[in-house]
Image: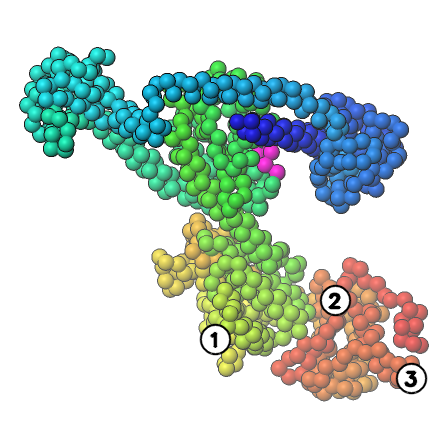
Amino acid sequence: MLLLVAVAAAALVVQGRYDAERSAEDRSLAAAEAFAHAPGTALALQSPNPTARLQAAAEQARKGAGVDFVSVLDKHGIRLTDPVPALIGTKAEGVGRAAAGETFTETFHGEPTDAVRAVVPVTDASRRVVGMVTAGIQYANVSHLLNRQLPILFGAAAGALVLATGGAALVSRRLLRQTHGLGPAEMTRMYEHHDAVLHAVREGVLIVDGEGGVLLANDEARRLLDLPEDADRRQVRELGLGPRLPRLLESQETATDEVIPAGDRLLAVNIRPTAPYGGAQGLVATFRDTTDLRALSGQAEVARGRLSFLYEAGMRIGTTLDVRRTAEELTEVAVPRMADFVTVELLDSVLHGQEPTSAVREMRRTALRASRTGHPLQPVGDVIRFVMADTPMASALRQGKAVLVSDLHSAEDWRAQDPEDALRALDYGIHSLITVPLRARGVVLGMVNFWRGTGSPRFEEEDVAVAEELAARAAVAIDNARRYSREHALAMTLQRNLLPLGLPEQDALEIASRYLPAQSGVGGDWFDVIPLPGFRVALVVGDIVGHGLQAAVTMGRLRTAVLNFSSLDLAPDELLGHLDEMVTRLDTQGGPTDDDRVPLTGATCLYAIYDPVGGRCTLSRAGHLAPAVVDPQGRVTFPDLPLSPPLGVGGHPFEAGELDLPEGSRLVLFTDGLIENRGRDIDEGLDMLSSAIAHADRTPEETCRALVDMMLPGHPSDDVALLVARTRLLAPSSVAAWDVPFDAEAVPRVRREVSRRLADWGLEGVAFATELILSELLTNAIRYGAPPVRVRLLLGRTLVCEVSDGSNTSPRLRRAASTDEGGRGLFLVSQFADIWGTRYAPRGKVIWAEQNLDSASEPDPSALFDVMGL
């Protein structure tokens, strides 16, 4: 006994000291975090005199928080404020982790005093640490509270020891007197058997001798038969058991489950004689109350009802992959079948689809459902904070399991969190609570509170298991919705960044576009508009096999490749040929373990180049649908263009087709998701598309809107890329061309004619640069090229000078040495032109140079001479 009391007292002392230190750490951390995150703390630390601005506030925070000190340090650990002014300017020890951005609590031993303290970094808007706040309670004050309790604790332990020892002695003396010297084993066995029959057996037992006298009646028999206290040794007929049961007992006959009424009960009676088993003449009768059997049946029915409720909850919770809707479904299931009011709070990180954080002291009310109006509970959207550490909600989060508060009137810890709101809830009639943390994969997502009010019974322990099971199912559904939201947001963000963020500025086409993702998520359809030299524009539409994030990534790879190949200014069929080779090479690089990799083979693409000078459009397609052409009168045609296999098949050449498009024609490029779905085939889809775009006066934007409204349901099964372009022609007055004899003496004449045309256009400011560019390009064409030689000027947003010849030899820019006689022409072109390049024609090449008319400037001649080594 002494050992048990000593161990218990020691355990209480250790637990008391531990609780005191933890309480001191919590208070210190709350004070430090409140001051560190207070508005103005970071700005004050960056001010010229932070001590003057923060000393008074720190003292006020210390007194309000009930801690011994609140000190503000700079990022090097130098005290800027302190309750002891002499310590200001000294360096604090052991704060290196906070300087690195970590918040921590510890029991500190050192100068100026031992203390339980918390250190919190202060960060600016860019998350850089600009200082630290430390708050704590001196260790002597932590121990003082425990020391005052030690006399009471040791006195109680001594009293318990005395009482236990004296009680044991008295009981021993009484037992020895009552057992008349019987051994402990015999007495124990006798009393165990006797007590089991009298008290533990849940069936009534009545032993009757051969004369009909009662020898023994256990507690259950006395209850069922309503026997008097002196029933032992009395005759059965004298006990008032009615006419039938005494006759049955006195007959000494065997009976099995004989149903006999006894008062308001129906008893199942079993009778067996005692003589065949070595006893004296008599019988043993047992009684079972069928009313209790009905109660057991009722309990089974309740259990079946709970199972049915949980099954229904599993079917109704998580029908969508939306976090807020899943929380609302939980409340809809629970009210009113389980509770009168249900609230669901979730972490803000969970609501935004992010990983749950460990900061569970603050949650946002996400769903609320009540069986009655006018309730005092906080509405949806409010932030719920758990300030007190011993409230039922905080206890449930800490323990990771449900907490039952059957009577809120007596729950002081619950009322301490918010006394005013708690009083309003009690006045409204709310009287019972079960709070359950929402946990999935071992991480807290939020919590759910079940409340009962006036007219409903209090929650019992049996309700806790149902609440935990309901919360567990909801937590899994919420976590699935959170992860889906995060992945969907990532996929949509990726796809938005892979698709064009806007259409480029150009004068050749009026363009409108649409991209609609599939109902199942992101896909691999894409489009692009790429300005090319000479005011030409490339239009691209493509489709990747499959859906999902991998398809979007694959689409990004192909789109990037098309952009890179278009910079080479290749013909459409040549570009698709290079793209096909790249797809084949990438597909062969995948290893046998890349099971989740989306193959590139099977992707389709349509590449078109429109030239506004003559209105000609050159198109090539790899397994893609032909575009629709709407002429200025509104007639719709689907031109018969050469069709090549999809990308990655290989072994087939790509062909190009040409269309002459009058000004005002509309070119409609689309993917198969626009015209195909489960309810219609391609031909029906093409007919619908024709009727939707067959209007002469519609703009590209109006055409896109009409196609979407007519062709696509609210949630298309396949993603759709749509591009509508209305053609424009470059005015003939903005185009000038000259055929140049293959003779160097023709260069000055052409230069003079170009100068006159620039004057007609009012471009005298760029005449010098244009003549220099023309001279260099034309001289190179005649010297190193082949006939025929042709010069063309194009005036639009910019001025384009083109020189073509019959040779496929491409010039290249290089730095000429000081001793070289040539090699500086293209360098001069690159200095005077904004951009320049080469493109190849079916016969020969075209070298072009483009000048920006808005910011035309000529290079410094002296700088040019220095660079050229002259």
User: In which image quadrant can residue 289 be found?
Assistant: top left
Determine crowd level at label 2: few under 14, some 14-19, many 20+ residues with C-alpha closer than 10 A: many
Callout 2 secondary element? strand
User: Is 503 left or right of 624, judged from the image as shown?
Assistant: right
Q: Earlier in the sequence, mark 1 or mark 3?
A: 1
Q: Position of residue 222 (x, y in %)?
A: 22, 18
**Residue 595: image location, x then y, percent:** 49, 67
**Label 3 vs 2, first from the N-terminus:** 2
Q: Which mark is residue 819?
A: 3
Residue type at tag 2? Leu
Quarter of the view holding residue 681: bottom left
Q: Nearer the viewer, mark 3 or mark 2?
A: 3
Tell me the distance, in whole angstroms, between the alpha carbons under discs 3 and 2: 34 Å
The residue where tag 2 is placed is 799
Give the magenta part as a residue range: 359-363
Any mark on residue 645, and which? 1
Q: Position of residue 629 (x, y in %)?
A: 49, 65
Asked if labels 2 and 3 touch by Cβ distance under 8 angstroms, the answer is no
Give the residue at x 63% y 75%: 570
User: Which callout, 1 or 2, points to the residue nearer the camera?
Assistant: 1
Q: Is residue 424 left or right of residue 241?
A: right
The mark that comes first in sequence, 1 or 2, is: 1
Left or right relative to 396: residue 299: left
Task: Answer yes or no: is residue 396 visible.
Answer: yes
Instruction: Name the residue nearer the viewer: 818 or 492.
Output: 492
Tag 1's secondary structure? loop
Residue type at numbered disc 3: Thr
Is residue 788 at all visible to an observer of this figure? no
